Amino acid sequence: MQRDLLSLNLYCQIHILSFVPLDELFRTVSRTCKRLAEICAHSRLWHGKFFLLSSHFDQNALLCQSAVVYSRVNSPPQVILYGGNVSEKNIIRDVKDTLWCFDYGASKWEQSKLARLTEHSSVVYKNHMYVFGGNGGLACNYTAQLQKYSLPFNPESRFETVEVTTPPSARSGHSAVMHNDCMYIFGGWDGKTSFGDMHQFNFVTNSWAEIPKQEFTPSPRRTHVAFVNRDKMFIFGGFDESRPAESFNELFSFDFVEKKWSLVSCKGDLPSGRSRCGQFLWKNFLYILGGWDRVRHFTDLYRLNLDTFEWEDCQTNLSSLSSGIAQHSCVVVGDWLHVYGGKFISTDNTMMASDRILVMRLGVSNPLPSSEPEVAEEDLEEMMMDEVMDERMQLLHDCMEDFMELDTIKEIKGRSSYRSFPMLCSSVSC
Protein backbone atom coordinates (compact mmCIF):
# COMPACT_ATOMS: atom_id res chain seq x y z
CA MET A 1 0.00 0.00 0.00
CA GLN A 2 2.97 2.27 0.57
CA ARG A 3 3.74 2.10 -3.16
CA ASP A 4 0.13 3.01 -4.00
CA LEU A 5 0.29 6.07 -1.75
CA LEU A 6 3.58 7.20 -3.26
CA SER A 7 2.14 6.92 -6.76
CA LEU A 8 -0.42 9.68 -6.08
CA ASN A 9 -0.05 13.41 -6.68
CA LEU A 10 1.85 15.09 -3.84
CA TYR A 11 -1.15 17.15 -2.80
CA CYS A 12 -3.33 14.04 -2.65
CA GLN A 13 -0.65 12.39 -0.51
CA ILE A 14 -0.64 15.38 1.84
CA HIS A 15 -4.42 15.43 2.04
CA ILE A 16 -4.57 11.70 2.84
CA LEU A 17 -1.82 11.96 5.47
CA SER A 18 -3.64 14.89 7.11
CA PHE A 19 -6.13 12.31 8.43
CA VAL A 20 -3.37 10.36 10.18
CA PRO A 21 -3.02 11.09 13.94
CA LEU A 22 -0.03 13.39 14.36
CA ASP A 23 1.79 11.11 16.78
CA GLU A 24 1.63 8.29 14.23
CA LEU A 25 2.72 10.72 11.53
CA PHE A 26 6.18 11.16 12.98
CA ARG A 27 6.52 8.03 15.13
CA THR A 28 5.56 5.59 12.40
CA VAL A 29 4.69 6.94 8.94
CA SER A 30 7.72 9.25 8.62
CA ARG A 31 10.06 6.37 9.41
CA THR A 32 8.90 3.86 6.83
CA CYS A 33 10.98 5.34 4.01
CA LYS A 34 12.84 8.52 3.13
CA ARG A 35 10.23 9.76 0.64
CA LEU A 36 7.41 9.45 3.18
CA ALA A 37 9.60 11.28 5.69
CA GLU A 38 9.99 14.13 3.19
CA ILE A 39 6.24 14.24 2.54
CA CYS A 40 5.54 14.18 6.30
CA ALA A 41 7.70 17.30 6.65
CA HIS A 42 5.34 19.38 4.53
CA SER A 43 4.07 22.57 6.18
CA ARG A 44 0.41 21.76 5.53
CA LEU A 45 0.70 18.84 7.93
CA TRP A 46 2.69 20.53 10.70
CA HIS A 47 1.71 24.19 10.67
CA GLY A 48 0.62 25.40 14.11
CA LYS A 49 0.60 21.90 15.65
CA PHE A 50 1.83 21.38 19.23
CA PHE A 51 2.57 18.00 20.83
CA LEU A 52 2.78 17.08 24.52
CA LEU A 53 5.75 14.88 25.35
CA SER A 54 7.07 13.11 28.43
CA SER A 55 10.16 14.79 29.83
CA HIS A 56 12.01 12.11 31.81
CA PHE A 57 12.62 14.68 34.59
CA ASP A 58 11.94 11.97 37.22
CA GLN A 59 8.47 13.47 37.57
CA ASN A 60 9.91 16.78 38.76
CA ALA A 61 7.77 19.67 37.53
CA LEU A 62 9.55 22.88 36.56
CA LEU A 63 8.53 26.54 36.88
CA CYS A 64 10.70 29.61 36.27
CA GLN A 65 13.77 27.59 35.34
CA SER A 66 16.40 29.01 33.00
CA ALA A 67 17.05 27.40 29.63
CA VAL A 68 19.96 27.89 27.22
CA VAL A 69 21.33 26.11 24.18
CA TYR A 70 25.06 25.43 24.05
CA SER A 71 26.12 25.13 20.42
CA ARG A 72 29.41 23.46 19.61
CA VAL A 73 31.43 23.41 16.38
CA ASN A 74 31.25 19.96 14.79
CA SER A 75 29.31 18.60 17.78
CA PRO A 76 25.59 18.25 18.52
CA PRO A 77 24.06 20.99 20.69
CA GLN A 78 23.14 20.64 24.36
CA VAL A 79 20.03 22.08 26.02
CA ILE A 80 20.73 23.16 29.61
CA LEU A 81 17.88 23.68 32.10
CA TYR A 82 18.67 24.88 35.61
CA GLY A 83 16.74 25.45 38.82
CA GLY A 84 13.10 26.50 39.01
CA ASN A 85 10.41 25.90 41.58
CA VAL A 86 6.90 24.65 42.21
CA SER A 87 4.59 27.47 43.26
CA GLU A 88 1.28 27.26 45.03
CA LYS A 89 -1.08 30.24 44.80
CA ASN A 90 1.85 32.25 43.40
CA ILE A 91 4.01 31.58 46.45
CA ILE A 92 7.43 30.08 45.69
CA ARG A 93 8.11 26.70 47.26
CA ASP A 94 10.23 23.62 46.58
CA VAL A 95 13.06 25.47 44.83
CA LYS A 96 15.03 23.08 42.62
CA ASP A 97 18.78 22.41 42.74
CA THR A 98 19.05 20.34 39.55
CA LEU A 99 20.81 21.18 36.32
CA TRP A 100 19.42 19.09 33.45
CA CYS A 101 21.22 18.56 30.16
CA PHE A 102 19.90 16.99 26.97
CA ASP A 103 22.71 16.09 24.60
CA TYR A 104 21.56 15.68 21.01
CA GLY A 105 24.52 13.44 20.24
CA ALA A 106 23.85 10.96 23.04
CA SER A 107 20.05 11.53 22.79
CA LYS A 108 19.59 11.37 26.55
CA TRP A 109 19.02 13.51 29.64
CA GLU A 110 21.67 13.82 32.37
CA GLN A 111 21.58 15.78 35.60
CA SER A 112 23.77 17.38 38.21
CA LYS A 113 22.97 18.80 41.66
CA LEU A 114 23.89 22.44 42.30
CA ALA A 115 22.56 25.28 44.48
CA ARG A 116 18.81 25.82 44.84
CA LEU A 117 17.74 28.77 42.69
CA THR A 118 14.71 30.08 40.81
CA GLU A 119 13.68 33.16 38.79
CA HIS A 120 17.34 33.73 37.88
CA SER A 121 18.84 34.39 34.44
CA SER A 122 21.29 32.34 32.38
CA VAL A 123 23.33 33.24 29.31
CA VAL A 124 26.09 31.46 27.40
CA TYR A 125 29.39 33.17 26.74
CA LYS A 126 32.11 31.14 25.06
CA ASN A 127 32.42 27.88 27.02
CA HIS A 128 30.52 28.87 30.16
CA MET A 129 26.95 29.41 31.29
CA TYR A 130 26.67 32.50 33.47
CA VAL A 131 23.88 32.65 36.07
CA PHE A 132 22.90 35.92 37.72
CA GLY A 133 20.51 36.72 40.56
CA GLY A 134 17.51 34.66 41.53
CA ASN A 135 15.85 33.48 44.70
CA GLY A 136 16.98 30.60 46.88
CA GLY A 137 13.53 29.82 48.26
CA LEU A 138 12.96 32.22 51.14
CA ALA A 139 11.16 35.57 51.16
CA CYS A 140 14.40 37.45 51.76
CA ASN A 141 16.74 35.11 49.91
CA TYR A 142 17.44 37.20 46.82
CA THR A 143 20.96 37.28 45.44
CA ALA A 144 23.17 39.48 43.28
CA GLN A 145 25.74 36.74 42.80
CA LEU A 146 27.19 36.00 39.38
CA GLN A 147 28.24 32.39 38.88
CA LYS A 148 29.64 30.44 35.95
CA TYR A 149 29.36 26.81 34.95
CA SER A 150 31.81 25.19 32.54
CA LEU A 151 30.39 23.77 29.29
CA PRO A 152 29.92 21.24 27.77
CA PHE A 153 27.99 19.48 30.50
CA ASN A 154 29.91 17.40 33.00
CA PRO A 155 28.04 15.89 35.99
CA GLU A 156 31.07 16.62 38.16
CA SER A 157 31.23 20.34 37.30
CA ARG A 158 30.18 22.91 39.91
CA PHE A 159 29.53 26.64 39.96
CA GLU A 160 32.40 29.08 40.27
CA THR A 161 31.61 32.47 41.78
CA VAL A 162 32.71 35.39 39.61
CA GLU A 163 34.34 37.93 41.92
CA VAL A 164 33.20 41.44 40.97
CA THR A 165 32.81 44.87 42.52
CA THR A 166 29.64 47.03 42.62
CA PRO A 167 27.15 44.49 41.26
CA PRO A 168 23.47 45.40 40.76
CA SER A 169 21.19 45.01 43.75
CA ALA A 170 19.89 41.51 44.55
CA ARG A 171 16.86 40.55 42.45
CA SER A 172 14.90 37.90 40.61
CA GLY A 173 12.47 38.00 37.68
CA HIS A 174 14.88 40.17 35.67
CA SER A 175 15.99 39.63 32.08
CA ALA A 176 19.49 38.99 30.72
CA VAL A 177 20.70 39.16 27.12
CA MET A 178 24.07 38.95 25.36
CA HIS A 179 25.58 41.43 22.91
CA ASN A 180 29.19 41.07 21.80
CA ASP A 181 31.29 40.59 24.97
CA CYS A 182 28.70 41.95 27.39
CA MET A 183 25.66 40.76 29.30
CA TYR A 184 22.84 43.22 29.93
CA ILE A 185 20.27 42.78 32.68
CA PHE A 186 17.10 44.80 33.07
CA GLY A 187 14.39 45.07 35.73
CA GLY A 188 13.38 42.38 38.19
CA TRP A 189 12.36 42.78 41.82
CA ASP A 190 13.43 42.05 45.40
CA GLY A 191 10.09 40.78 46.67
CA LYS A 192 8.88 44.28 47.50
CA THR A 193 9.90 46.66 44.71
CA SER A 194 10.18 46.26 40.94
CA PHE A 195 13.25 47.71 39.25
CA GLY A 196 13.61 49.78 36.08
CA ASP A 197 17.41 49.86 35.92
CA MET A 198 19.77 48.39 33.33
CA HIS A 199 23.26 47.07 34.01
CA GLN A 200 26.07 45.90 31.75
CA PHE A 201 28.56 43.19 32.68
CA ASN A 202 31.70 43.21 30.54
CA PHE A 203 33.24 39.72 30.33
CA VAL A 204 36.57 41.11 29.12
CA THR A 205 37.09 43.56 32.00
CA ASN A 206 35.06 41.49 34.49
CA SER A 207 33.19 44.60 35.63
CA TRP A 208 29.64 45.95 36.07
CA ALA A 209 28.39 49.36 34.87
CA GLU A 210 24.92 50.89 35.15
CA ILE A 211 23.30 52.37 32.03
CA PRO A 212 21.84 55.80 32.93
CA LYS A 213 18.05 56.15 32.72
CA GLN A 214 16.56 58.17 29.87
CA GLU A 215 13.22 59.51 28.72
CA PHE A 216 12.13 56.23 27.12
CA THR A 217 13.69 53.81 29.59
CA PRO A 218 10.93 51.24 30.28
CA SER A 219 9.03 51.67 33.54
CA PRO A 220 9.91 49.32 36.43
CA ARG A 221 8.81 45.75 35.74
CA ARG A 222 9.60 42.09 36.29
CA THR A 223 9.08 38.77 34.45
CA HIS A 224 9.12 40.52 31.06
CA VAL A 225 10.50 39.53 27.65
CA ALA A 226 13.95 40.69 26.49
CA PHE A 227 15.80 39.78 23.30
CA VAL A 228 18.50 41.06 20.95
CA ASN A 229 18.11 41.61 17.22
CA ARG A 230 21.06 43.00 15.31
CA ASP A 231 22.45 45.85 17.46
CA LYS A 232 19.36 46.45 19.57
CA MET A 233 17.81 45.00 22.69
CA PHE A 234 14.01 44.91 22.95
CA ILE A 235 11.73 44.77 26.02
CA PHE A 236 8.11 43.62 25.95
CA GLY A 237 5.54 42.91 28.66
CA GLY A 238 6.17 42.33 32.35
CA PHE A 239 4.32 43.44 35.44
CA ASP A 240 4.37 45.92 38.30
CA GLU A 241 1.64 46.85 40.74
CA SER A 242 1.82 50.52 39.70
CA ARG A 243 0.02 49.86 36.41
CA PRO A 244 -2.81 47.66 35.09
CA ALA A 245 -1.37 44.35 33.90
CA GLU A 246 -3.03 44.60 30.49
CA SER A 247 -1.20 47.89 29.77
CA PHE A 248 2.21 46.19 29.57
CA ASN A 249 2.10 45.61 25.82
CA GLU A 250 4.50 48.32 24.65
CA LEU A 251 7.75 47.48 22.86
CA PHE A 252 10.93 49.32 23.83
CA SER A 253 14.32 49.17 22.13
CA PHE A 254 17.82 50.00 23.32
CA ASP A 255 20.39 50.80 20.65
CA PHE A 256 23.76 49.39 21.76
CA VAL A 257 25.66 51.67 19.37
CA GLU A 258 23.91 54.94 20.24
CA LYS A 259 23.21 53.93 23.87
CA LYS A 260 19.67 55.18 23.45
CA TRP A 261 16.22 53.91 24.49
CA SER A 262 13.20 54.29 22.18
CA LEU A 263 9.50 53.44 22.26
CA VAL A 264 8.78 51.36 19.15
CA SER A 265 5.58 52.04 17.22
CA CYS A 266 3.99 48.69 16.37
CA LYS A 267 1.05 47.80 14.15
CA GLY A 268 -1.08 44.78 13.41
CA ASP A 269 -2.83 42.53 15.92
CA LEU A 270 -1.10 43.60 19.14
CA PRO A 271 -1.06 41.09 22.01
CA SER A 272 -2.54 42.19 25.31
CA GLY A 273 -0.20 43.03 28.16
CA ARG A 274 1.20 40.01 29.98
CA SER A 275 4.05 38.67 32.05
CA ARG A 276 5.74 35.26 32.44
CA CYS A 277 5.28 34.35 28.77
CA GLY A 278 7.71 32.27 26.75
CA GLN A 279 9.80 33.86 24.01
CA PHE A 280 11.99 32.77 21.14
CA LEU A 281 13.45 34.11 17.90
CA TRP A 282 12.98 32.31 14.61
CA LYS A 283 14.38 33.82 11.42
CA ASN A 284 13.27 37.48 11.48
CA PHE A 285 10.44 37.09 13.98
CA LEU A 286 10.02 37.34 17.73
CA TYR A 287 7.48 34.87 19.08
CA ILE A 288 5.76 35.09 22.46
CA LEU A 289 3.80 32.16 23.86
CA GLY A 290 1.19 32.19 26.64
CA GLY A 291 1.74 34.15 29.84
CA TRP A 292 -0.83 35.76 32.12
CA ASP A 293 -2.23 39.16 33.14
CA ARG A 294 -2.88 38.37 36.83
CA VAL A 295 -6.40 37.20 35.90
CA ARG A 296 -6.19 35.10 32.74
CA HIS A 297 -3.66 32.57 31.51
CA PHE A 298 -3.11 32.58 27.74
CA THR A 299 -2.57 29.90 25.10
CA ASP A 300 -1.98 32.26 22.19
CA LEU A 301 1.16 32.49 20.09
CA TYR A 302 2.03 35.91 18.65
CA ARG A 303 4.87 36.82 16.37
CA LEU A 304 6.45 40.20 15.62
CA ASN A 305 8.07 40.95 12.26
CA LEU A 306 11.35 42.61 13.20
CA ASP A 307 11.55 44.51 9.89
CA THR A 308 8.04 46.00 9.86
CA PHE A 309 7.21 45.71 13.61
CA GLU A 310 3.84 44.24 12.76
CA TRP A 311 2.27 41.79 15.23
CA GLU A 312 0.39 38.70 14.08
CA ASP A 313 -1.73 36.23 16.04
CA CYS A 314 -0.55 32.77 14.95
CA GLN A 315 -3.27 30.15 14.97
CA THR A 316 -2.27 26.93 16.76
CA ASN A 317 -3.93 23.91 18.36
CA LEU A 318 -2.63 24.72 21.86
CA SER A 319 -6.07 25.59 23.21
CA SER A 320 -7.07 21.96 22.59
CA LEU A 321 -4.26 20.83 24.89
CA SER A 322 -4.36 23.52 27.55
CA SER A 323 -6.41 26.42 28.88
CA GLY A 324 -3.28 28.42 29.66
CA ILE A 325 0.49 28.23 30.08
CA ALA A 326 2.95 30.51 31.91
CA GLN A 327 6.33 30.48 33.65
CA HIS A 328 7.74 28.14 31.01
CA SER A 329 10.93 28.38 28.95
CA CYS A 330 11.37 28.06 25.19
CA VAL A 331 14.39 26.96 23.18
CA VAL A 332 14.81 26.34 19.47
CA VAL A 333 17.06 23.58 18.16
CA GLY A 334 17.16 23.16 14.42
CA ASP A 335 13.63 23.89 13.26
CA TRP A 336 11.92 22.57 16.40
CA LEU A 337 10.53 24.64 19.26
CA HIS A 338 10.73 22.98 22.69
CA VAL A 339 8.68 24.40 25.56
CA TYR A 340 9.81 23.13 28.95
CA GLY A 341 7.74 22.96 32.13
CA GLY A 342 5.68 25.93 33.23
CA LYS A 343 2.35 26.44 34.93
CA PHE A 344 0.01 24.35 32.81
CA ILE A 345 -3.75 24.79 32.91
CA SER A 346 -5.45 21.64 31.63
CA THR A 347 -8.55 21.83 29.46
CA ASP A 348 -10.67 21.08 32.56
CA ASN A 349 -9.04 24.14 34.26
CA THR A 350 -6.84 22.12 36.63
CA MET A 351 -3.69 24.14 37.37
CA MET A 352 -0.42 22.27 37.82
CA ALA A 353 3.32 22.64 37.48
CA SER A 354 4.18 20.74 34.33
CA ASP A 355 6.76 18.00 33.88
CA ARG A 356 5.94 17.76 30.17
CA ILE A 357 7.47 19.20 27.02
CA LEU A 358 5.50 20.96 24.30
CA VAL A 359 6.98 20.67 20.83
CA MET A 360 6.14 22.41 17.56
CA ARG A 361 7.86 22.37 14.20
CA LEU A 362 8.74 25.87 13.01
CA GLY A 363 10.32 25.39 9.61
CA VAL A 364 9.62 22.59 7.20
CA SER A 365 10.92 21.56 3.84
CA ASN A 366 8.70 21.48 0.78
CA PRO A 367 9.20 18.10 -0.93
CA LEU A 368 7.48 19.28 -4.13
CA PRO A 369 9.64 18.37 -7.16
CA SER A 370 10.29 21.31 -9.46
CA SER A 371 8.55 19.45 -12.28
CA GLU A 372 5.29 19.14 -10.35
CA PRO A 373 2.97 22.17 -10.70
CA GLU A 374 1.44 24.00 -7.77
CA VAL A 375 -2.18 23.16 -6.98
CA ALA A 376 -4.45 25.86 -5.57
CA GLU A 377 -6.27 25.04 -2.33
CA GLU A 378 -9.71 25.18 -3.98
CA ASP A 379 -8.50 22.91 -6.81
CA LEU A 380 -7.19 20.45 -4.23
CA GLU A 381 -10.58 20.36 -2.53
CA GLU A 382 -12.27 19.74 -5.88
CA MET A 383 -9.80 16.95 -6.66
CA MET A 384 -10.54 15.29 -3.35
CA MET A 385 -14.30 15.43 -3.95
CA ASP A 386 -14.26 13.70 -7.34
CA GLU A 387 -15.37 10.15 -8.10
CA VAL A 388 -12.08 8.56 -6.97
CA MET A 389 -12.38 9.93 -3.42
CA ASP A 390 -13.82 6.68 -2.12
CA GLU A 391 -10.90 4.79 -3.62
CA ARG A 392 -8.38 7.15 -1.96
CA MET A 393 -10.09 6.89 1.42
CA GLN A 394 -9.94 3.12 1.14
CA LEU A 395 -6.25 3.51 0.34
CA LEU A 396 -5.85 5.61 3.50
CA HIS A 397 -7.56 2.88 5.52
CA ASP A 398 -5.33 0.18 4.05
CA CYS A 399 -2.18 2.28 4.53
CA MET A 400 -3.06 2.93 8.17
CA GLU A 401 -3.45 -0.79 8.77
CA ASP A 402 0.02 -1.32 7.29
CA PHE A 403 1.49 1.50 9.39
CA MET A 404 -0.02 0.13 12.59
CA GLU A 405 1.69 -3.19 11.96
CA LEU A 406 5.04 -1.33 11.99
CA ASP A 407 4.38 0.37 15.31
CA THR A 408 7.44 -0.83 17.17
CA ILE A 409 10.70 1.09 17.35
CA LYS A 410 12.66 -2.04 16.49
CA GLU A 411 10.84 -2.62 13.20
CA ILE A 412 10.89 1.08 12.28
CA LYS A 413 14.64 1.36 12.83
CA GLY A 414 15.10 -1.69 10.64
CA ARG A 415 13.40 0.03 7.73
CA SER A 416 14.96 3.48 7.77
CA SER A 417 17.57 5.51 9.61
CA TYR A 418 15.94 8.76 8.52
CA ARG A 419 14.94 10.88 11.53
CA SER A 420 12.55 13.79 11.09
CA PHE A 421 11.99 14.44 14.79
CA PRO A 422 14.31 14.94 17.79
CA MET A 423 13.24 12.08 20.07
CA LEU A 424 13.33 13.67 23.51
CA CYS A 425 10.76 11.31 24.91
CA SER A 426 8.98 8.02 24.59
CA SER A 427 5.32 8.99 24.79
CA VAL A 428 3.24 11.48 22.84
CA SER A 429 -0.25 12.91 23.06
CA CYS A 430 -1.96 15.24 20.61
Image (cartoon, rainbow, N blue to C red):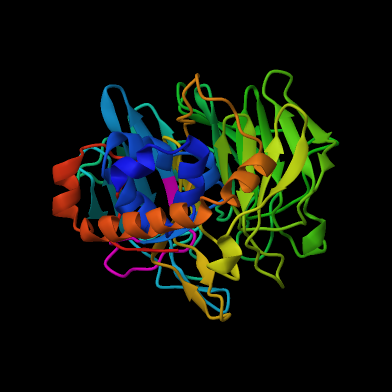
Measuring 81% from the left and 32% from the top, which residue is drawn there?
Answer: 262
Locate residue 220, reporting x and y percent: 74, 51
Locate residue 167, reporting x and y percent: 54, 41
**Nearer the observer, 237 or 388:** 388
Where is 305 relative to 193, above or below? above
Majority secondary structure in the magenta region: loop
Apparent side of residue 154 relative to residue 345 in the rendered image (left or right) = left
Apparent side of residue 164 relative to residue 242 in the rendered image (left or right) = left
Measuring 31% from the left and 53% from the top, which residue is drawn there?
Answer: 27
Locate residue 261, reporting x and y percent: 77, 31
Apparent side of residue 97 relative to residue 44 in the rendered image (left or right) = left
Is residue 317 in view from this perspective? yes
Q: Is residue 62 magenta?
A: yes
Where does the magenta region start and end? 54-67
Count of marks, rendered view: 0
Measuring 56% from the left and 35% from the top, which residue is drawn there?
Answer: 282
**Nearer the observer, 382 or 235:** 382
Where is 15 relative to 298, above or below? above
Apparent side of residue 218 relative to residue 35 in the rendered image (left or right) = right
Q: Quadrant of the C terminus?
A: bottom left
Locate residue 188, reporting x and y percent: 62, 53
Is residue 340 in view from this perspective? no
Measuring 69% from the left and 54% from the top, which residue is drawn there?
Answer: 238
Q: Is residue 333 magenta?
A: no
